[in-house]
Image (spheres, rainbow, N blue to C red):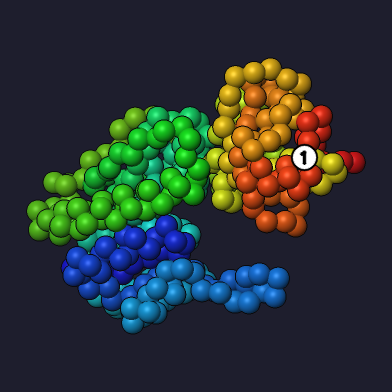
């Protein structure tokens, strides 16, 4: 099948590689424009753009894809596959492909329509999530479903770990989906697509203000927040007047004043919450490196009796 593939972050790479491995012809890759990166602001391509160049595939990085529907139609692709592309597609763009546009979405639609399904599945304490291949329409993840694959959640994974798992699952899903898309082209899409079933839930882009830890909340809830924001944008709090980022933390039984460190050793930094104890296993001092809790304690950056709290005034 002749395809255009649209994506940007590392999450979009495994499905892209699987499409190539399956022998499909990718006429072009569509991705976001290069962005400044690092302190020097060096213009850096998206991970997908870098990989496509390695594979010798033409790259289109339109700032506004809606202005290039005719150019996309001229490619002559049967369909476009999108995966975390990052731009809204208009009807003329959708109409540029004979069989339509199909999206690899990181949830079991209609659960977690929107920009941050991986984080919200963890935040909500969901027992399972997955990947959905849907036919894109002009709504927000409202299109009909081609297929879905379920992934169980253990309740201990970070967003980074879950993203990697779902990207691998997305690769399997799109390998299953492309023959169905081809069949739909022959038999009619109504033969292979199904409407979304269930009550929709929406999730917006994560804002940094949502990442501040409130230790009056239960430890279980705080653990979810830490894991959902790891490895970025990272949950955080303040200790000794400076910001501290949290990479990994788990809840455990116990009772202590919210924000107060009650144990700090090689097993972790244990902090009181509104209900239970939050045991922090990986964190990062302001301007420092990510480190294990034991190293953080050995560096005398935290001790029993210290208190995590809001930003100093």
- In this rendering, is residue 17 above or below 112? below
Residue 175 figure quarter? bottom left
Between 77 and 43, the residue placed more toward the observer is 43
Q: In which quarter of the image is residue 261?
A: top right
Can residue 110 be seen by looking at this rendering?
no
Q: Where is residue 234 in the image (x, y as percent from the top left)?
A: 63, 47
Residue drawn at (16%, 53%) of the image: 180
Residue 249 position, x and y percent, is 59, 36
Q: In this view, does 200 lie above or below 78?
A: above
What is the crowding at mark 1: few (fewer than 14 residues within 10 Å), some, or many (at least 20)?
A: many
Residue 186 at x, y percent in the picture: 10, 58
Q: Which quadrant of the structure image shows residue 30?
A: bottom left
Q: Residue at x 84, y 41 (%)?
A: 240
Direction from residue 138 to residue 182 in the image, left or right: left
Task: Please state if 47 lies on the left or on the right of 297 as rendered.
Answer: left
Query: In the figure, 281 relative to 178: above or below?
Result: above
Residue nearest the viewer, comparing 306 with 53: 306
Residue 278 in view: yes
Instruction: Residue at the far right: name it.
Output: 313
Is residue 223 or residue 189 the one in the foreground?
223
Task: Return the residue at label 1.
Answer: 302
**Image position of 10 with respect to 294: above or below:** below
On the rendered image, what quadrant is the N terminus found in?
A: bottom left
């Amino acid at each position: 099948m002749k395809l255009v593939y649209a994506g940007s972050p590392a999450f979009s790479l495994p499905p892209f590689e699987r499409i190539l491995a399956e022998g499909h012809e990718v006429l072009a890759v569509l991705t976001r424009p290069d962005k400044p990166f690092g302190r020097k602001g060096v213009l850096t391509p998206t991970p997908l753009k870098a990989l496509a160049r390695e594979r010798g595939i033409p790259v289109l990085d339109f700032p506004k894809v809606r202005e290039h529907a005719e150019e996309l139609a001229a490619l002559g692709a049967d369909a476009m596959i999108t995966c975390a592309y990052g731009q809204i597609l208009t009807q003329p763009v959708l109409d540029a492909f004979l069989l339509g546009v199909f999206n690899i979405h990181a949830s079991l639609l209609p659960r977690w329509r929107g920009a941050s399904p991986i984080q919200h599945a963890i935040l909500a304490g969901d027992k399972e999530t997955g990947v959905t291949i849907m036919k894109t329409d002009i709504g927000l993840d409202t299109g009909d479903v081609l297929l879905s694959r379920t992934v169980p959640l253990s309740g201990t994974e970070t967003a980074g770990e879950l993203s990697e798992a779902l990207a691998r699952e997305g690769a399997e899903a799109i390998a299953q989906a492309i023959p169905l898309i081809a069949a739909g082209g022959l038999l009619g899409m109504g033969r292979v697509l199904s409407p979304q079933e269930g009550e929709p839930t929406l999730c917006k882009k994560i804002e940094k203000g949502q990442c501040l830890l409130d230790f009056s909340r239960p430890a279980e809830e705080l653990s979810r927040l830490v894991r959902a924001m790891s490895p970025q944008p990272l949950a955080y709090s303040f200790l000794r007047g400076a910001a501290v980022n949290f990479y990994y933390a788990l809840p455990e039984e116990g009772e202590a004043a919210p924000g107060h460190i009650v144990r700090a050793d090689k097993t972790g930094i244990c902090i009181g919450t509104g209900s239970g104890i939050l045991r922090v296993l990986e964190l990062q001092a302001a301007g420092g490196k990510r480190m294990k809790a034991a190293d953080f304690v050995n560096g005398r950056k935290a001790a029993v009796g210290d208190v995590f709290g809001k930003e100093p005034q």
